[in-house]
Image (cartoon, rainbow, N blue to C red):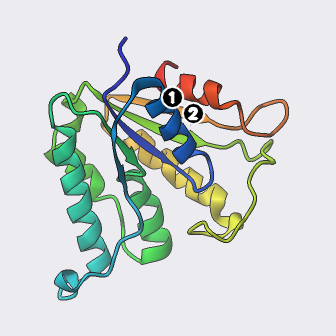
Amino acid sequence: MAHPKKLLIEGLDRLGKDTLIRGIQDRYGYHLVLHFRKPELLQCYESGASPQRSYQEASFTTMFQVLHAPGATIICNRAHLGECVYAPMYRGYPGDYVFELEKQFGVSRLTDVRLVLLTEDFARSGHFVDDGQSLGAADKREREQSLFLAAFEKSIIADKRIVCVTDTASGDFRSRSDILDSALNG
């Protein structure tokens, strides 16, 4: 099977999304990388009930439109599943509207899109260091991951993979090549 042309890379902060994306590009060449960050508070959304949701919905609508581009090679660093985690936990609104967007844009029929969710094994992992850069505190990671897993299961994207980045023996990160192979071939 040829590698997917469009990849959505999801998961908690500090699990190696950027490293995985670099590995994909090293292996397969240029991909347009769309990095979805926390919502910006823009004036054009201030009149609505939830400016952050309005921003996010506009960004994910654009993402789904771009995923329909034939032949394009695209990687989304974070995508819409994070909205199901961070919106209810930190922004005060539900994020499950993203599944209506999936249906609206027919993502179940897109054969060149793969959703990859990076996870960690909390019973074994010793690689996470709380550097103050993550959205939530370290004690929120397990709850965040459980919400990512629930969103992953609910997603109608046909080609999807869960890749645990934790080495089962050492608790450190698995090798970059193992994680890359699991995301692309596994």
- Foreground mark, 1 or 2, reads 1
Residue 161 in view here: no
Q: Amino acid at mark 1?
A: Ala
The x, y position of residue 87, in whole percent, is 41, 68
The x, y position of residue 14, in whole percent, is 62, 54
Residue appearing at x 67%, y 71% in the figure: 132
Direction top: furthest residue: 1
Residue receiving disc 2: 163
Image position of 159 (left or right of 163): left
Direction right: furthest residue: 170
3D distance between C-alphas at marks 1 and 2: 6 Å
Residue appearing at x 35%, y 14% in the figure: 2
Q: Is residue 128 above or below residue 86?
A: above
Residue 109 in view here: yes
* Precedes in sequence: disc 1 or disc 2: 2
Q: Residues within 10 Å of mark 2 (few under 14, many from 20)?
A: some
Q: Is residue 39 above or below residue 97?
A: below
Residue receiving disc 1: 183
Q: Are marks 1 and 2 in contact (CB under 8 Å)?
A: yes
Q: Is residue 27 above or below residue 157?
A: above
